[in-house]
Amino acid sequence: FQAEDGIRDSSVTGVQTCALPISLRRVVAAGGDPAVAALVALGRVGSVEALRELELALGSGNPAVRAASAEGMLIVADRRLVAGDRSGARLVYERVRSADVAGVWRVAAHRGAVLAAEGDVVPAWRNLLGSPDPALRELALSLFRELRDPGINAALIAEAAGLDPAWQA
């Protein structure tokens, strides 16, 4: 079928979709469940155009829209990371990390950014461990099990002496 702005649906016609329908922006602007579902679906699409729409929605005044946009962007970033595009994934994680979204999305973005780090991950890991945010310190400790960097063990041992006793347990 042909959408109102001339974009063809590739699942029906077999024609490559070249842009997102303008009506999507109306759905996002209206907020609610349809906007949340649309933004998460855009994350699964993962195209450059989809990411552009997700970034626009990340600046929305509606917290639910921002959260759904962050979730969609994390899906894009995770897929890029799995595909081996570490630098592309890291850019998307950084955008979510700095966004005005709930802590759970920022923590997930911090996790992804550390996992996508190129080269020595110890400095990024230490930043999390030294954060005043308890959720980020907890993330650093959980990442300890995921990271395969040989410097992480030595860094954790070195940092353990300076940790608050509650965190040393």
Image (tube, helix red, strand yellow):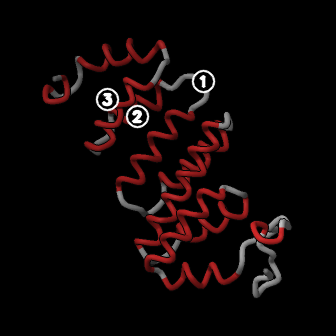
Residue bearing mark 1: 119
- What percent of the width, then of the height, locates residue 68? 47, 65
Q: Residue at x 76, y 83 (%)?
A: 3
Q: Is residue 15 above or below residue 134?
A: below
- What percent of the width, then of the height, locates residue 37? 50, 69
Q: Residues within 10 Å of mark 1 (few under 14, many from 20)?
A: few
Which element is circle 3 on? Answer: helix
Label located before the other in sequence (2 or 3): 2
Which element is circle 1 on? Answer: loop
Label 2 – label 3 distance at C-alpha:
12 Å
Q: Which mark is residue 127?
A: 2
Q: Residue furthest bottom?
A: 4
Which element is circle 2 on? Answer: helix
- What percent of the width, then of the height, locates residue 38? 56, 71
Residue bearing mark 3: 141
Label located before the other in sequence (3 or 1): 1
Amino acid residing under circle 1? Gly
